[in-house]
Structures are given as structure tokens and as C-alpha cells.
Image: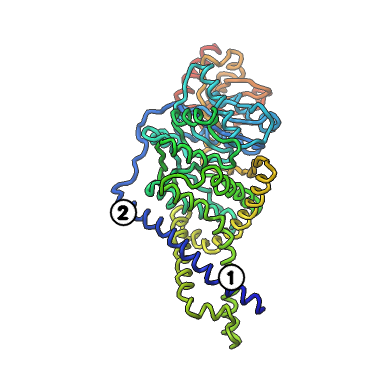
Amino acid sequence: MDIIDAWVAACLLPLAIVAVLSGIDDLILDMSVAWGRLRRRRPEAGPGLCPEKRMAVFVPLWQEHDVITRMLRHNLSAIRYSNYDVFVGCYPNDSLTLEAVREIEALTPNIHLTIVPHDGPTSKADCLNWIYQAMLAHEEACGSRFELVVTHDAEDVIHPEGLSWINYYLRSHDMVQIPVLPLPTPGHRLTHGVYCDEFAEFQTKDVPARRMLGGFLPSNGVGTGYSRRALEALASAAANRLFDPECLTEDYDCGIRLHRLGFRQYFIPIQFLEGQPVATREYFPRRFRQAVRQRTRWVTGIALQGWERHGWRGGLGVVYWFWRDRKGLLGNPLSLLANLVSVYGMATLAWAAATGRPWGLAGAVLAGATGWLLAVALISQGWRILVRMVCSGRIYGWGYAAGVPARVVWANWMNAIATALAVVRYTRARLGRRSHAWLKTEHTYPALETASRRQVLPLARIDPAGVRRETARALPLHVVERWKVLPCRINEGRLLLATPQEPPPGADAELSRFTSLQICFQIVSPEDFERLLGAAAVQVR
């Protein structure tokens, strides 16, 4: 016990100094953001009636067959932006995902399957590069051009106005990041709650401060919009590769490269419409092991590979943010150590007070001349927790924010373990001259329960001229008029019915009386349905 007490006592002062310095570093950001808010006279403007530029949405996949169909169907029905196509990248040895994408591609004209020319998994960056090549081939074949590109993942819930806002801000910038916020989960889910707290604080404070202090904007990997000229500059500077296939955090790396090329970057501040933030939402890992796996990739790509590739070059603002992004290599393990030492110190003091025994060496340090420094460190950490509670409460409510102190301790464990694993794996890869593997995260897509089934059905435009006469006759005309459905396509035993409204309960069973085919619905606008119905009525007669 005396040895442990001496060891703890030796750690107290260095840990206190580190905590105070880190607290000052964070306080700089707090003051910068507060000053920026005071100077801002009015909130950011929305997109308004900004003309829609043609947009390509890139979605790279590896073993995402469980979620990709729901992701595409929901987002296609929810997005309030018409001038876009979705390019979905798959690997030839991922047959289940290929089948899922082919199925929805056959029903939706603005979804395009891209098959990477080699087996996977390689890296997300590699998949994105091949999606870009597929987009170029599509342009050449169709004689068209996409002006904007947005990246998304298989688990993303895209805000209905998300693409419109990106389109608006890309008028004057070349890279735009819309906020990314985890979907809420019950308070007892500590692991996912850590993501809620961290992203709320990061996107409320840290990212806006980068712009104010002259730093680069790292992409979040999803909800990131690029102008075409920025992408072409990236491709030109790196042998036609937009993203570095060897980098585990290609989004972060891309932000640095665009900043160095002189392109303007912008983060859209968190704003609320109809009580909800305009942001890309998703579920992050809810199990400890999955979270550590994801954070290991983040530490490897951002801190270690970022250091290796970009060093400490750049102006003062860039170097400062390099320091902020990499200080976790030291800070994450020390935060866990500080938790353990604090628990031991408080237990020692409580035991001494209860038994009347001497405080021991650790207790003496706490009560001695260095106690004031430890008190400052404690106040600093208390302020950090309070700031995180305010940021989290703004998004998830104050009841949820009350759990921040417990989740901070849980986060220290996850981050410390992830940092240790990242250092070990990075060192092994360097010594063995091996590339880093794609540490894929298992994804879950939310079961979106809405008042209208329209929110989960695919939305697309159907050309009346493309409806064949025999298909239109698949249902009697009186059935078409009664149920407001129109047969549009027959594919692999399925009858696709266009409809402008939510099919009522029991519609599938009732309509199945008139056909042996499997019933599938497709939401179209009321205007498109009237045009389709008119054309079909002429054919049926």
C-alpha cells in the first residue's frame, strides 16, 4: 500500500499541470466561440429559392446489405431536392450487397450501381475513387455534367433540406460540411451517449472555432459537399485520385489538402427547423468493442497518419489545430490515469477521515502546497464537463445532459484503449511495411416510425412514355382509379405500382386479388401521377 501511495503521490502534480494546460487550451476555444456569437448580428440564412445544381451523391459500401435498402428508400422519399443522382459503390465479392443495390436500382432511375474492379475490402477512399470514375463514365455516356458531389454512408439519415443547404453554400465555397449528429438513444446506453456528447460539443464549439482561428476544416466523411472544380484539383494533384487509398481517415486528409490548395471551406452552424437540427443523423456504435474499433481507426488516421503525411507544416492556425487533433495521443491515456488517481486519492482521504488515521503521502500532497494547483485542475475539468453538458443539452435535452459526467469517465476508458491499440497497430504496419486495413464499423439503420408510410417508400419520377401497354393492363382500370395506384413496371415477379399517397392498411392484400405478382409501391408526386394515369387510361381503352 505504501508503494501505491507513493506512486500516486508522484503522479498528482504532473497530472495537475497537464490538466491545467489542457484546460487553458480548451478555454481559448470557448472564448473564441463566445466572442464569435456576440459579434454575429443575425443567424445564418437558409437556402431559400437557390437554383438547384446537378448533384451526385457518393455512397461507398462493404457488407452493408442489412441497411442499404432502407437507407436509400427512406432518403429518396425524404429529400426535398430533385436534381441529384446516387452512385453506390460495391465490391464484386460482396454478393449480398450487390443484390440489394441491384434490386432498388431496377426500381429507381436515379440510383446507379458502381462495381469496384477488384475484390474488397480495400479502403473507403479507394471505393470513393472508383465511384468518381463511374460518375465520369456516366457523364460521358449521357452527355451531362454534375456540378456538385456529396459523400454519405450506408447508415445516414439525410435531413430533407440537407442537399439544398449544401447546394446553397457551395455557391461561394468549394467544400461545405453540414453538421453530423448521432440519433438519440436511452440514457443508459453509455457508449452511444459518448458519441452524442462529443459530436454535440465538437460541432457546436470546435469546428466553428477552426474557421475563426484560421484552421482547416476536416470533413466528417458524410454530409460533405464539394464543388466540381475542387474535386478536379484534387484529382489533378494526385494522379486522378480524389482520396488517398492508404489513408484510414480520407475525409480528414482531404480537408487538409483542399485547405493547402487554397479552396474555401465552410461549416454550416447547427440550426433548427421544426424543432430538429438540420444535420445528417445516424447511429454510432452502441457496444464498447465496436466503439473502440472505430476510435482506433480515427486515432490512426487523424493523429498518426496525419502526423506522418503532413507533419507540422503550415501557418500558426494550421499548426495549432494539428496540436489539437494529435494531443489525444498523450491526453487520452493520461485522462484515464487521472481518473484512477483521483478515485484513489478521494478514497484515501475518505478512509483517513472515517478512521482518524494519517492521510498518507497522496493525501499529504493534496493538502500541501501543491493543493491549489490541483484545485485549479479540478475546477478546469468541472468547467469542461459543464460546457459539454450545455452543448449536449442543446441537442438532446437537459435530462440527457445530466448523464454527461458519467459518460465522460466512460469515454476516457474507450479513448485510452483505442489510442493504445492505434499506436501498436500503426507501429506493426510501419515495421512490416504493410498497408492499414479498413477497420469497418457495423452499421444499424433506424426503424423510422412516421405518421405516413410515404417516409419509407422510394420517391422517383416515372416517364409516362416508359409505361408499356401490357403493364398498364395488369390491373383493371376501376381498381387503378379506386386505389389511386398505377402499374408501371414488372420485374422478377414484382409488380411496381406508382401512387401519390400512403397505401391504406390492407391495400397489398386487396390488390393481390387481381394479380399473382408481388405488390411493390412507388411514391410519385400528385402531378406525375395524374400524367401517368392519363396516359395509362388512353392505353387501356
Report the colour scheme: rainbow
Question: Height in image: 147 above or below 374?
Answer: above
- The quarter of the picture where the C terminus appears is top right
How far, Cα to Cα, is label 2 from label 1?
Answer: 39 Å
Q: Position of residue 80 (x, y in %)?
A: 45, 33
2 or 1: tag closer to the N-terminus: 2
User: In this orientation, does residue 418 appear?
Assistant: yes
Q: Residue furthest bottom?
A: 356
Q: Which is nearer the eye, 400 or 204?
A: 204
Residue at 44% x, 60% y is 387
Mark number displayed over residue 38: 2
Residue at disc 2, secondary structure: helix
Residue at 50% x, 24% y is 461
Quarter where residue 163 is shown: top left
User: In this orientation, does residue 512 appear?
Assistant: no
Using a 10 Å C-alpha cutoff, classify the residue at mark 2 as few (fewer than 14 neighbours), some (14 to 19) or many (20 or more). few
